[in-house]
Image (tube, rainbow, N blue to C red):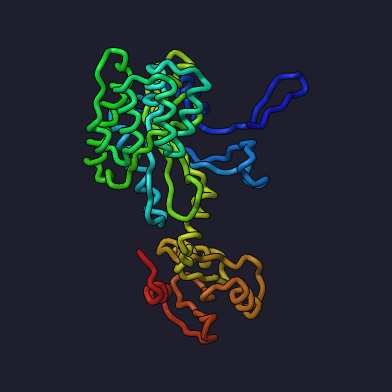
Amino acid sequence: MFKFQDFDGKLLALRAEMTAPVARIVTTRMPSAPEPIRLFYITNVFRYNPSYLKNEREFYQAGIELVGCNTPEADGEILALLISFLKQIGLEQVRIDLGNASLLKDLQNAAGLDQKQKAALQRLLSCRDLIGLKKFMTENNFPADLCDVFVELSRCRKLSEVSKISLNGSKYEDAKKQLQSLKELQKALVDYGIDDLVYFDFSLTRQIEYYTGMVFEASVPNLGLPLGSGGRYDKFIEKFGKLDLPATGFALEMGKLLQALTAQGFEIPKDPKTKVVVACNSTKAGVEAVNALRACEVVASLDVTRRDLNKTLEYGKLTEADYVVFVESNNSPVTVYDLKSDKSKTVQLDAFIKSIGGKN
C-alpha cells in the first residue's frame, strides 16, 4: 500500500482495493436497502508490490459484491457470474481454484500451533510436500485423526472429494462447520453447472485477514498469474458501522484480462458498422439525415466546416469513411459518393440506408 503524510501530518493512503470503500458505502448510504444488495464497480487502485512492474502499480479493477446473504446459493452465484464473465469476453479453459479461509485456521488452532509453526505448515501445504507435512505433524505431536484429515485435505482436488472427509470431537466444531459449508457449496455448484471448473486447494487462504469462508482465484493456462480473486467476508462490514451483514464478491484486474486474451490469440473484432459523412446546403436537412442514419445504427457525422464537396470527399477518405452523402434539402434525393470505388449515385435516403444494411 502507498502511504504518506499530508501537510497536517495526517497519514494518508492510496486506495489499494475496493472492498473497504464498498463496505463504507453500504453502512453509510444504504442502511435500508433491500437485501441482498448487488453492487459492481470499475475503478483504479494502487498497490506498492515488488511483483508489479512500475507502470502496473496503478491498475483498473472490475468487481462485484453481493451483500446481505450467506447461503451456498449466494456463493454459487458469485462463482457462476465470474466464470460466465470470463467466458463471455472470449477466454478459454477458465479455472477456479477454491479454498476456505477459516478451515485451515480452525485446524491449526485445534493443533495448538503458534504463528511460526502456522507459517511453516502453510509453506508445506502450498508446495504440496506430503512427506514434509507428515514429518512436521509427527514432530509437533498432531493427534492421529488430525494428521489423517490434513493429508486427505491436501490430496483433494475437487469439492466432491472434500465432502467425504469427516471430523469427530468437540474441539473440531469450528472446522466441521467449514467442511459442511464446502459440502453445501458443492451442491450449489452442481446446480449452476460449473462444478467441473472449480478445483479445491486446501492451502489457498489469501493474505487478507477479513475473509471468513470460501476464497478463490481465477486463472487460465499459460499466463502464470491469477486474473482476479475474491471470497466471503461476513464480519467485515460491521467494522464500518452498526450493520452486521455477510458479504461475498470478487475483483478482476483489467490489464491481466487483456494479457490473457492476447496470450490465447484473441483479436478484438473490427467495427463492422458503415461510416458516413453527411454534407449539406441546408443544416436542418443535414441534421435530419444524420439522425436518420444513426437511428439505423450507421456511424454518421455532419460536416460542419462549410468546405466544398471535393475537400469533404478528401476528408472522408482520410478518416476511413465508407460514404459521403450530399443532402440538398429535406425529402429530396441524396447524392451518395462511394469512397472505395469513387463512384456516385442519386437515390432516396431510405433506399441508401436499406442498401447498406442499416437496422431500423
The foreground one among 261 and 67 is: 261
Quadrant of the image occupied by residue 171: top left
Nearer to me, 14 or 100 = 100
Q: Is residue 164 left or right of residue 34?
A: left
Residue situated furthest right in the rendering: 7
Left or right of 223? Residue 38 is left
Camera-nearest residue between 310 and 180: 180
Q: Position of residue 319 (x, y in %)?
A: 60, 71
| Position of residue 119 measured from the top left corner of the image (x, y, whole percent) | 51, 26
In this rendering, position of residue 93 left or right of residue 23? left
Q: Residue placed at 35% from the left, 48% from the top? A: 84
**Numbered label tally:** 0
Res. 320 visible in picture: yes
Q: Residue at x 51, y 54 (%)?
A: 258
Q: Position of residue 164 (x, y in %)?
A: 22, 32
Work out whether residue 65 can be spotted: no
> Where the C terminus falls, by quadrant?
bottom left
Q: Front-most of 303 and 49?
A: 49
Q: Is residue 244 above or below residue 316?
A: above
Q: Residue at x 71, y 27 (%)?
A: 4
Quadrant of the snapshot with the N terminus: top right
Image quarter of residue 145? top left
Q: Position of residue 79 (x, y in %)?
A: 34, 40
Instruction: Report which quarter residue 298 is drawn in.
Output: bottom left
